[in-house]
Amino acid sequence: MKLSQRALEIQASPIRKLMPYANAAKKEGVKVYHLNIGQPDIETPKVMMDAYHKFDEKVLAYGPSQGLDVYRHGLTQYYSKHNIFVNEDEIIVTTAGSEAIVFALSVVCNEGDEVIVPEPFYTNYNGFATMASIKLKPLTTYAENGFALPSSDKIEALITPTTKAILLCNPGNPTGTVYSAVEIKRIAEIAKQHNLYVISDEVYREFVYDGLRHFSIMHVPNFEENAILVDSVSKRYSACGARIGCIVSKNKELMVAVLKFAQARLCPPTVDQLAANACVQLEDSYLEGILAEYKKRRDLVFDELQKIEGCICVKPQGAFYIVAKLPIKDAEDFIIWLLKEYRVSNETVMAAPAEGFYATAGLGRNELRIAYILNEEDLTKAMHIFRTGLAEYIRTHG
Amino acid sequence: MKLSQRALEIQASPIRKLMPYANAAKKEGVKVYHLNIGQPDIETPKVMMDAYHKFDEKVLAYGPSQGLDVYRHGLTQYYSKHNIFVNEDEIIVTTAGSEAIVFALSVVCNEGDEVIVPEPFYTNYNGFATMASIKLKPLTTYAENGFALPSSDKIEALITPTTKAILLCNPGNPTGTVYSAVEIKRIAEIAKQHNLYVISDEVYREFVYDGLRHFSIMHVPNFEENAILVDSVSKRYSACGARIGCIVSKNKELMVAVLKFAQARLCPPTVDQLAANACVQLEDSYLEGILAEYKKRRDLVFDELQKIEGCICVKPQGAFYIVAKLPIKDAEDFIIWLLKEYRVSNETVMAAPAEGFYATAGLGRNELRIAYILNEEDLTKAMHIFRTGLAEYIRTHG
């Protein structure tokens, strides 16, 4: 029995693919510090857990395809705090950010159409592209300058008659790069000139450091028809298991189309929406404490990486990831070696090889992504293992 | 800004599209009996609600892409009670049956490939086909003989070089038809001869009446490589809002491919899986009571329909739907008229026009689907309004 070509070609998760090595180490009794996955260790807000505990309908019924009214209203309030002024009809709740991106790609692209995306990019965009039968066209950015966006010429050179959108992740996974207002407006300008949509994945909106303010695609003036925001509560409220996201746009025709896709799958999960809605009322102080914690972690990881001779990375200003270019040939081989061979007091560490975050063949092979999602004590130990392990790996694999 | 062709073409839900008329009636203070949607009124089991209330992790984390181990184990136990013997690796948990079908279509079909499906079929298959960029090839069945499967010749006549699968819904939505073991084996035989998969949507497995036993695609001997089961807890436990389904197959290569699709969207909702798992332990008596209730409702609706001169329908033996062919030209027009004009003691009734359940243009225009998901008292009133309304409609629109 043959499978489809796309079934054979869809990328296995580079974040999860080395898990068998980690599991084997754990079976030997080795403790593995996971810096490979963006699963925050921060506690989910109590109000969110309370919402699960308080659910008291008699029937766990379908909700509306566009999401529960109460939650869409809550989201309008949340967004207004970020100077994004939308009404309920401009929001469709999705099953996590994943579905929001697949819907966005599907309504703007026909099968085979192209979407420009700065690389390295969130690796699951590959899977979403396969699901939506579209092509990602990588716009290469570099560790050496903090993965800044290339010149407009370089971006425009990628545009073809089948290009339908530019997909941004801001703040960026895996780079941690935060695009400035000037850069976002520059992208919007290009998009407008070439009749492209900008799909902006802003799930790390709150995670910006050093006094920066996040500039959303929704903040660009006169860009209402082109701007599509995709979002999720996963990172913001440390609630990756809730699977609640949304798609936001002021383009009415587009939202009519998204609603039809949403109707086909009936609705997002009901109780999880109520739980997400409970978080809308959280005080700003909730996130301030978390941000201070992440900033401390970022500095810790960055300082450790700076101690490595030949390691290239610019201090990122957002999200909770760092991509580092290492003085080795193959980061995946290094990570497997860490998991199989290297122990400090019977502990080791895992990161995500960055090659899977690139679409251009061969790029990123000597890079890896570190997610700083552990507490300071564990992160200190993990980075110590990482640094001494790398030295040992270079010495033995030179 | 142009949208994609598929964004323009994807079907709006025929079940939900007449909702504005229902909402307008409600605004006038009219009570509307909803027989248009498969949202059971039966209470969700208490053990399921308790699982939401008892969730006490500190972090609502990502689960495994294939679903929580505990729940996949629970599902193996559930299936074994139905003489379906699978292990955990043969199950991948999905975000409702919807996602299971999209995954199944995507791994067996390339873009543009064809899947044969008996019509009338669950209307959202159209949306799933658009999402997966495949074509549904309708195999027409008829109200006159209870929507029985046509002869093998007629089925084989639809097979082309790009046909990859036959999609069945058993028991059927919207028809309520239950396929016998002989019929399922006949389909499997055809599939085997032509190297096709059979994707079997069995979310109504438990809802069979008159002493019938459900025969699953997983019961067909020597069909392991071809059989794909899609399932959901929505109807079984009256938990449509949980959005928990699964895809089951003994075809190892296929499950590897499904897992890659599952990894791309990370995981199904965590707490909802725990809630679904709580239901695995329910005694058989839980469903027996519910079945008796549905059987009573089916008989009530069928008896009322029998009183209508010129109404064609065979008593269905499964699910909780009846498709009736009426002695009118346009069932949608009739339903809109009911919602806009017809009142009995300030109450009216809504059903789903069946045309959207057909892929062949023009079919089903004088048919509608009734979901018998109200209690006996309400259903009696609703069917009285329906029957008297139809008489009045025929008299005035003749």
Image (tube, coloured by chain):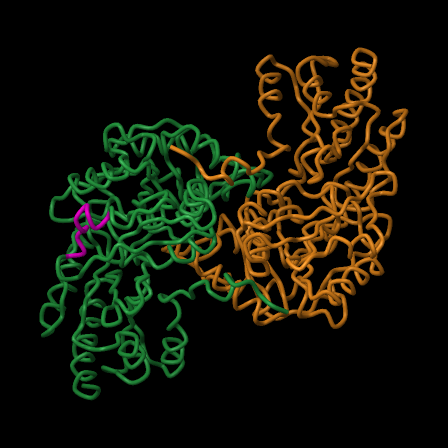
Chain colours: A orange, B green
Residue B170 in the image: above or below residue A90: above
- Residue sitting at 64 percent across and 54 percent down? A231
- In the image, B59 versus A119, the foreground residue is A119
Q: Is residue A320 magenta?
A: no
Residue B71 in the image: above or below residue B203: above
- Residue sitting at 66 percent across and 19 percent down? A31
A340 horizontally vs B316: left or right: right
- In the image, B155 versus B20, the foreground residue is B155
Residue A388 in the image: above or below residue B240: above
Q: Is residue A57 visible?
A: yes
Which residues lie in the magenta part?
Answer: B146-155
Main SS, magenta region, reads loop
A180 horizontally vs A132: left or right: right
- In the image, A75 versus B188, the foreground residue is B188
Residue B31, image quadrant: bottom left
Q: Whole-percent x and y of residue A308?
A: 88, 25
Location of the N terminus of chain B by quadrant is bottom right
B25 horizontally vs A333: left or right: left
Q: Whole-percent x and y of residue B375?
A: 23, 62
- Residue sitting at 58 percent across and 17 percent down? A24
Q: Is residue A286 visible?
A: no
Which residue sits furthest bottom? B396
Residue B386, image quadrant: bottom left
Q: Whole-percent x and y of residue B199?
A: 33, 42
The mark tally for this picture is 0
Location of the C terminus of chain B by quadrant is bottom left
Residue A393 in the image: above or below residue A173: above
Q: Whole-percent x and y of residue B121?
A: 30, 56
